[in-house]
């Protein structure tokens, strides 16, 4: 009996000692993180998540009474939690290892792809945006509608089992039915290139690559009835091998290899399409941010290759208006050669692209085919686009959007709204 009692006493004492140790360890953990939260300076921006972080909220009686202050405190503590980036990555890894299909609406896909989870588009916004495009066509403008499916539609072979939905396919079918004369169908080209093993979308970002944009260029040239530059007229060059894009910022899965950013650089002596021969244009790019204007002689902004948002290497970040102009006298021999052959001057003209950022790596392919390319982002551009087109003498319009933007962004319909104001 004594031996049994002694054993029970030892077990009890050891258990109490273990509980005490766990309690002390937990308290140290809590106090350490609390001290770190107080001592460490707040961060303004998370490069991993590519977003600004919440700042310490301002205290006021009205905000406390409405519970707004406590909501802001919760956001602040969540955003400024010590080691937040590592915890976010650990959460993504735990979900991936546990067999979950996605994290933060981003699928863990095959071949090290992260693919955004498509959402059903609001029917009213999609209908309004489509009506706006059709209204400009009815008004006499030469309008094309190019809506790119997202990776979840084209790279369905890489999605987890039973993750594919027909949301985007149904939306694109509607555009084919209701706008058959102006719809530029890029899905076949993107699907074919993917089946051939070409990387048409980034693995960690929601944008298409320049290889994907080239397939859209071929489809648009076919719609225009004009000859594109063949792919062998370009050299594919890698400009960065350490790009982590928007999908990785949302998902933050550790151990994922970075993306490569590549450009299609015209080869000397290569055909520029439309039978123009060698492409020798010189361009000026004019940027307008809503307040000031500045110019550049390069389509690519290399400083962004040293930053998180490397896709902004293509024509920079979203601006209200960007104009690419062929410099006067850049190709003096071309028109003279055409005149000697009895040919009419080339009808390159001007093009206005209503767009989202998908247009940024697409626009370079169009340069040999137009004298001027105007890219307007209707989310930020406050000018009357109808008056602008009249002033600039622009009759040719291209709507170029990703499926998500065209279906869900109310700003796409702004041009149609401005047109409606002019009608009695």
Image: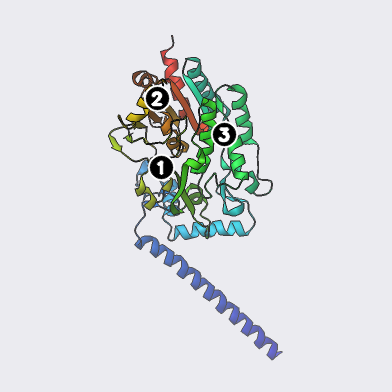
User: Against 142, is 118 above or below?
Assistant: below
The numbered dot on residue 348 is none
Residue denoted by label 1: 268
User: Against 256, is 154 above or below?
Assistant: above
Residue 92 visible in image: yes
**Residue 46 x %, y %:** 41, 52
Q: Nearer the viewer, mark 1 or mark 3?
A: 1
Q: Nearer the viewer, mark 2 or mark 3?
A: 2
Residue denoted by label 2: 338
Give the secondary structure at mark 3. loop
**Residue 292 x %, y %:** 27, 34
Quadrant (top left/top right/bottom left/bottom right) for the C terminus: top left
Query: Sequence-wise, which precedes: disc 1 or disc 2?
Result: 1
Horizontal side of residue 229 vs 381, given as left or right: right
Label 2 – label 3 distance at C-alpha: 33 Å
How many marks overall?
A: 3
Which residue is most to the top? 424
373 or 41, nearer to the observer: 373
Give the secondary structure at mark 1. loop
Graded by Cα atoms within 10 Å as few (under 14), some (14 to 19) or many (20 or more), the crowding at tag 2 reads: some
* Label 2 close to label 3 by CB (< 8 Å): no
Give the secondary structure at mark 2. helix
User: Against 71, is 380 above or below?
Assistant: above
Horizontal side of residue 19 vs 37, given as left or right: right
Residue denoted by label 3: 186
Residue at left offset 63%, top offset 82%:
11
Query: Sequence-wise, which precedes: disc 1 or disc 3?
Result: 3
Residue at left offset 57%, top offset 37%:
149
């Amino acid at each position: 009996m004594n031996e049994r009692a002694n054993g029970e006493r030892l077990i009890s004492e050891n258990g109490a000692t273990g509980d005490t140790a766990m309690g002390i360890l937990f308290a140290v953990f809590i106090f350490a993180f609390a001290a770190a939260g107080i001592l460490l300076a707040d961060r303004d921006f998370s490069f991993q998540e590519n977003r600004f972080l919440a700042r310490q909220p301002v205290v006021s009686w009205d905000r406390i009474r409405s519970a707004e202050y406590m909501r802001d405190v919760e956001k602040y503590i969540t955003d400024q939690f010590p080691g937040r980036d590592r915890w976010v990555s650990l959460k993504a890894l735990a979900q991936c290892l546990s067999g979950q299909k996605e994290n933060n609406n981003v699928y863990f896909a095959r071949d090290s792809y992260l693919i955004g989870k498509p959402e059903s588009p609001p029917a009213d916004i999609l209908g309004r945006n489509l009506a706006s495009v059709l209204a400009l066509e009815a008004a006499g403008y030469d309008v094309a509608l190019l809506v790119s499916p997202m990776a979840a539609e084209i790279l369905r072979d890489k999605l987890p089992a039973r993750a594919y939905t027909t949301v985007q396919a149904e939306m694109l079918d509607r555009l084919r039915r209701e706008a058959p004369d102006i719809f530029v169908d890029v899905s076949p080209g993107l699907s074919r290139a993917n089946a051939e093993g070409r990387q048409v979308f980034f693995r960690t970002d929601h944008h298409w690559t320049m290889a994907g944009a080239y397939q859209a260029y071929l489809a648009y040239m076919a719609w225009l009835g004009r000859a594109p530059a063949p792919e062998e007229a370009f050299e594919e060059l890698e400009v960065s091998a350490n790009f982590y894009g928007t999908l990785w910022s949302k998902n933050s899965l550790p151990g994922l290899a970075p993306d490569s950013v590549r450009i299609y650089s015209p080869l000397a002596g290569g055909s520029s399409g439309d039978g123009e021969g060698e492409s020798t244009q010189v361009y000026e790019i004019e940027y307008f941010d809503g307040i000031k204007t500045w110019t550049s002689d390069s389509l690519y902004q290399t400083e962004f290759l040293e930053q998180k948002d490397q896709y902004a290497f293509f024509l920079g970040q979203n601006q209200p208006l960007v104009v690419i102009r062929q410099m006067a006298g850049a190709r003096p021999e071309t028109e003279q050669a055409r005149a000697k052959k009895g040919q009419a001057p080339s009808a390159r003209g001007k093009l206005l692209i209503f767009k989202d950022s998908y247009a940024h790596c697409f626009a370079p392919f169009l340069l040999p085919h137009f004298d001027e390319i105007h890219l307007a982002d209707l989310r930020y551009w406050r000018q009357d686009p109808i008056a602008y087109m009249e002033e600039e003498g622009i009759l040719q319009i291209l709507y170029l959007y990703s499926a998500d933007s065209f279906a869900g962004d109310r700003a796409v319909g702004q041009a149609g709204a401005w047109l409606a104001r002019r009608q009695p």
